[in-house]
Image (cartoon, rainbow, N blue to C red):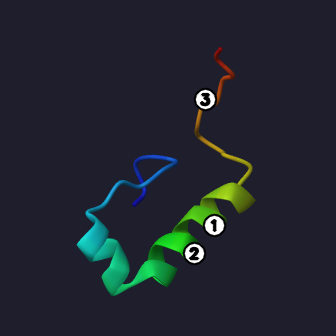
Amino acid sequence: MNGSYITFVEEETFLQDPQKYIDNAYDKSENNASGYDLTKQR
């Protein structure tokens, strides 16, 4: 949940508590991707 900008989990795990993962993604986005090297690739 903390090591990557996007958290990969099994579908079954996600469906048990989707708000947990949605909130985690939102919190990361509010951090302006601090600590991540985001690049545009084509």
Relative placement, left or right, of 42 versus 24 is right
Q: How far from the left and from the top, in percent, is residue 40?
A: 69, 22
Q: Is residue 32 above or below residue 35?
A: below
Q: How far from the left and from the top, in percent, is residue 26?
A: 64, 66
The numbered dot on residue 23 is 2
The image quarter containing residue 1 is bottom left
- The disc, 3 or 2, on the residue closer to the chain's N-terminal end is 2
Badge 2 amino acid: Asp
> Counting other residues with Cα less than 10 Å from the Cα at mark 1, is it few (<14), some (14-19), or many (20 or more)?
few
Cα separation between marks 2 and 1:
6 Å
| Residue name at image x 64 percent, y 17 percent | 41
Q: Quadrant of the C terminus?
A: top right
Helix, strand or loop at label 3? It is loop
Name the front one of labels 3 and 2.
2
| Residue name at image x 53 percent, y 69 percent | 24
Relative placement, left or right, of 8 versus 29 is left
Q: Which residue is mark 3?
A: 37
The image quarter containing residue 23 is bottom right
Q: Are marks 2 and 1 in contact (CB under 8 Å)?
A: yes
Q: How far from the left and from the top, in percent, is residue 37?
A: 60, 29
